[in-house]
Image (tube, rainbow, N blue to C red):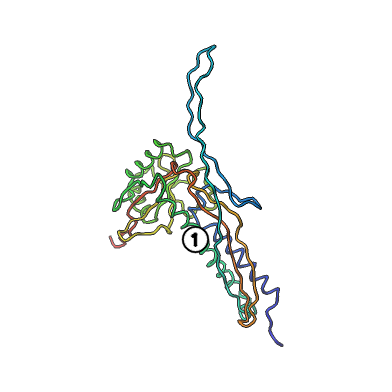
Amino acid sequence: MAQTATTGNLDSAQKIIINTSRYTEEHNAPAMALIEQFSLPKGAKQVTVPKVGQMEMSDLVDGVDIIDDEDIKMTTVDLTSSEVGSKVILTDKLLRQMADNVFAMIGRQMGDAMARKKDTDVLALYTNLNGGTKLGAATKFMKATNVQACISFAKANKFGSQLYILHHPNAVAYLSKEAATVASTASASIPDGFTADLLSNFFSGLRPFNGVPIFEDGNIVEDSSGDGIGVIADKGAMAVLNSVETRTERQRDASLRATEVIMTSDYGVFELDDSKGAGITFDVADLATNN
């Protein structure tokens, strides 16, 4: 009897790919999970987010009118989105075999690709925060004293109340090695205000320095000098605008004896408030494994 690839085969394969891809994407983009989330309403082309400056309060005298006017100093940021996507080809032969683990593998690969794309889009914003002035320095390590100085800078300059640090695993490993001799920096849980489900795999486990949790992200690029740019920021420093979550379409290619499954997402990432974060340059080269 002839073997055919039925619609049921295709529906099952596509469902496995989509579900695996979405889960993988959600749980592999720590930089994306640490910023503000906005949704684009149907029929709209952008979301305009207002920002107001600090105001001052004046001392008053009983019976005397208030004469000081305050300018709200409002500015706005326009958020727009654009599409990204990829295509996978499911051959009739593969569909006939119905190997669920193969479809799950394809889903993981596509989810990893989408997560990496979204994550690196956010990482690219770090270098321009704080007017482009970065903390740390080339060839310097992520030592406890440097981390404390970054945190004190952020708090003194009023970055915000939901501060976090994200850097390369090698930079965090240096800090962890240094902190191993300090009892007060033992393993701790992710502080309130951060999504443990999405960030647990990227939390350093170090007790938050002055209440600031430290996360790690292997997508941070090591430059030719062995340095990389992480960040210290408030959650409100950057934002993502989600227009359309991951969606799929499929198209039959008879001559190829296969079906193309196209997956796309529509989003955009932006600086929301330049004054609420700063890039941090530290050495991210591999630590010696033969000491």
Work out which quarter of the rendered image holds the C terminus and state it: bottom left
Q: Is residue 92 above or below residue 134?
A: below
Residue at x 61%, y 65% (from the top left corner): 18
Local secondary structure at mark 1: helix
Residue 162: x %, y % from top left: 48, 41
Marks counted in the figure total 1
Crowding near pointer 1: few (<14 within 10 Å), some, many (20+)?
A: some
Residue 148: x %, y % from top left: 36, 41
Q: Locate residue 86 relative to residue 158 in the image: left or right.
A: right
Work out which quarter of the rendered image holds the N terminus and state it: bottom right
Q: Nearer the viewer, residue 59 or 277?
A: 59
Q: Nearer the viewer, residue 81 or 106?
A: 81
Residue 180: x %, y % from top left: 35, 49
Q: Is residue 278 above or below residue 10?
A: above
Amino acid, disc 1: Lys
Q: Is residue 17 above or below residue 212?
A: below
**Residue 13 location, quadrant:** bottom right
Residue at x 51%, y 19% (from the top left corner): 67
The residue that mark 1 highlights is: 117
